[in-house]
Each structure stands twice: as C-alpha cells, then as structure tokens.
Image (spheres, grey):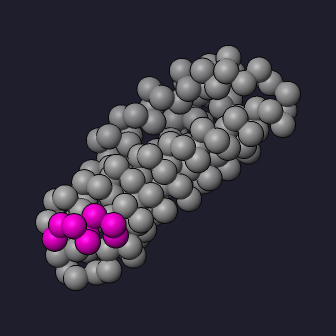
C-alpha cells in the first residue's frame, strides 16, 4: 500500500515541478521545445524529490534501516521505472506539452495536465511490473 502512496506523493511533486518550471521558463522563452524540455526537468526533480522524501518517511515510521532498505527497493524499482519513464512517460509529457503550448494553453495548466497524463501511463506500467515481482519473485516494493 505504501508503494502507490509513495508514487502518488512523487506525482504531486512532478505535477508541481512540471507546471511551475514550465511557467517560469515561458517568461524567458517562447520556444515550445524549451518549455517542454523544462516541463520534463521539473517533473524529474519534483517527482524524484517528493518520492524519496515519502519513502524515507515510511521507512522511519516502520522502523526499517533507511539507507539499506531504500537501496534494496530501488534495486528492484529502478530497472522498470527508468525505461518506463524515459521511453514512455517523459516523451508523452514532452510532446503533449508542446502540443498544448502550440495551442495557446496557459503553461502552468499545460505542464500540470501533461504531467498528469504521463503519470497515468507510468502508474499503470509500474504496477504491472510490481504485480509481476509479487507473483514471480514474491518481492513486494513497500
């Protein structure tokens, strides 16, 4: 149960990061490419930060050794999360953001909506992976 909460917590950071950074960059550049690139950067920084923060908080609450258990979780999580994010979720965010900016959407709203759409894809894929880990290897990422 904590796994999806950690991912959702990270998603809040990703939405805020993508929306805020793309809105800020839009004041300095009108390039759809640049704005979309910074939406992805904001998503990575915001999402990763809040995901790790929530994971650490949960480890402390459960009394688990923080560094060792986080590294062990990330050993299982990263091989799936990285390709899903790099090849599916972030490209989706990038191209959707470019589309919204081209169609004159407010950059803050466009960043948030684009990130949320990319997240729906990410959460679906990562939970299929997690289900496979549970079924095949009896390993739960909580």
What residue do we see at 50% from left, 42% from top?
48
Q: Does residue 65 belong to the magenta stretch?
A: no
**Residue 80 visible in the snapshot:** yes
User: In this picture, is 137 found above or below 17?
Assistant: above
The image quadrant where one finds the N terminus is: top right
What residue do we see at 53% from left, 55% from top?
13
Residue 85, located in which quarter of the rendered image? top left
* Tally of numbered tags: 0
Residue 17, located in which quarter of the rendered image? bottom left
What residue do we see at 62% from left, 53% from top?
9
The image quadrant where one finds the C terminus is: top right
Name of the residue lying farthest toward the front? 28
25 or 113: which is nearer to us? 25
What residue do we see at 77% from left, 20% from top?
65
User: In this picture, is 141 found above or below 31?
Assistant: above
**Could you tell whether 15 is left or right of 4 in the image?**
left
Percent coordinates x, y for residue 134 in the rendering: 65, 29
**Residue 138 visible in the snapshot:** no
Percent coordinates x, y for residue 84 in the rendering: 38, 40
Q: Does residue 26 belong to the magenta stretch?
A: yes
Q: Which residues are magenta?
A: 23-30
User: In this picture, is 68 found above or below 100?
Assistant: above
51 or 128: which is nearer to us? 51
**Could you tell whether 138 is left or right of 88 in the image?**
right
Percent coordinates x, y for residue 122 in the rendering: 45, 49
101 or 75: which is nearer to us? 101
Residue 38, located in which quarter of the rendered image? bottom left
**Could you tell whether 63 is left or right of 47 in the image?**
right
Percent coordinates x, y for residue 76 in the rendering: 55, 24
**Could you tell whether 111 is left or right of 119 in the image?**
left
């Amino acid at each position: 149960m904590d796994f999806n909460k950690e991912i959702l917590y990270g998603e809040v950071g990703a939405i805020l990061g993508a929306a805020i950074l793309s809105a800020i960059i839009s004041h300095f550049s009108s390039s759809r490419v640049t704005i979309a690139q910074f939406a992805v950067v904001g998503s990575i920084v915001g999402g990763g930060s809040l995901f790790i923060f929530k994971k650490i908080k949960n480890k402390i609450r459960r009394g688990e050794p923080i560094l060792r258990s986080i590294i062990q979780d990330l050993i299982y999580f990263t091989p799936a999360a990285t390709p899903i994010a790099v090849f599916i979720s972030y490209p989706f965010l990038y191209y959707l953001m470019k589309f919204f900016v081209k169609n004159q959407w407010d950059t803050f709203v466009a960043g948030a909506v684009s990130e949320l759409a990319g997240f729906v894809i990410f959460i679906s894929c990562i939970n299929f992976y997690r289900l496979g880990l549970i079924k095949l290897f009896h390993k739960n990422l909580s």
